[in-house]
Amino acid sequence: MKRLTFAALVIPMLFAALLLPGCGGDDKSPAGPDDPPRTPRFVFNSRRSGTSQLYSMKIDGTDLVPVTSVGESVFGANNADGTRVVYESFRDSRQDLYVADFDGANEVRLTDSAAASYRPVWSPVADLIAFVSDQDPVGGRDIWLIAADGTGLRQLTNDPAEDTFPVFSRDGQRVFFVSRRDTNQQIYAVGIDGTGEVNLSNNAFEDTTPMADPTADRILFASRRSDNYELWTMNLDGSGQAQLLTIAGGEFHPSFTPDGSQIIYYSDVGGNRDLYIVDVAGGTPTALTTDPESDFKTGTLIAR
């Protein structure tokens, strides 16, 4: 019988070990439980550079990075995995949508139309973007859908009243939006196939800027049922409307953090429009910005 040498036994075992996950010098395995969690980013608008531009920042208020630097850019939102931003920008007498990285690199023009396109948001489950446009020649401002690669453009709502502030449900199957089609400003829902349109908030007050809770079947929105806009929630069918928090001043454009434990919003309670973050459970809000040129939250925060 042929005897195997020590080298013949050990070397193949070492080679096999190098191919196992976590072994060898090229480890591409997922982050382990001891790795620090990734801090999500969000986008906001500011005139701190002298013109209206978009910036991104971590939700702890650090690592401020400009996203845009040309034209006038107002409203932006990140995609589900926190790698790309979609935003509206006014350039060359045109208001179109663009997609880029969080630092503005790899910018791609998404729409190219004589009609204005603005207030884009990304689906949390697909590369699908909802936005507002007035490109329907016989209608007003409506909600439209487009894939992140610029294909599949289609109209979602069609009403003479202005439809705006779209946001996807957390399962990506519905779009919540704001409209005055029933006289006062209310929050509506429609399926991404255009069916099932319904007035959700359905009351005599001004309701605006809805946002789906990423961890529960409820909608966060701003409502003027007092002297200021305050943060309210309701169920997906419009029931259970209740004020979530009582905070000094008015709160605008609220957005959940990805884990649903905090809300980012902007307020002028300090004299300028600045960004704040507050726990859903209550407590004292923390200022994320203190710039005299005014900052305000514009898009959704859905990165996980």
Image (spheres, rainbow, N blue to C red):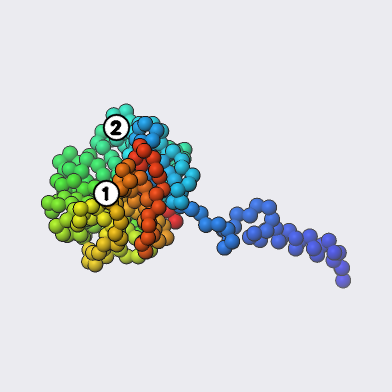
The residue that label 1 is drawn on is 165
Front: mark 2 or 1: 1
Q: Nearer the viewer, residue 146 or 279?
A: 279
Quadrant in the rendering for residue 140: top left
Quadrant in the rendering for residue 136: top left
| Horizontal relation, residue 239 to residue 148: left or right | left
Taking the spot 26% from the left edge, 49% from the top edge, the residue there is 165
Question: What residue type is disc 1 on?
Answer: Phe
Looking at the picture, how far across and down is residue 251, in whole percent? 29, 52
| Element under disc 1 | strand
Determine the residue located farthest toward the top in the rendered image.
Answer: 92
Quadrant in the rendering for residue 135: top left
| Horizontal relation, residue 250 to residue 51: left or right | left
The residue that label 2 is drawn on is 94
Q: CA distance from mark 2 to mark 1?
A: 20 Å
111 to 9, vertically: above or below: above
Looking at the picture, how far across and down is residue 29, in whole percent? 59, 57
- Local packing at callout 2 (Cα closer than 10 Å; few below 14, some 14-19, many 20+) is some
88 to 263, vertically: above or below: above
Looking at the picture, how far across and down is residue 221, in whole percent? 27, 56
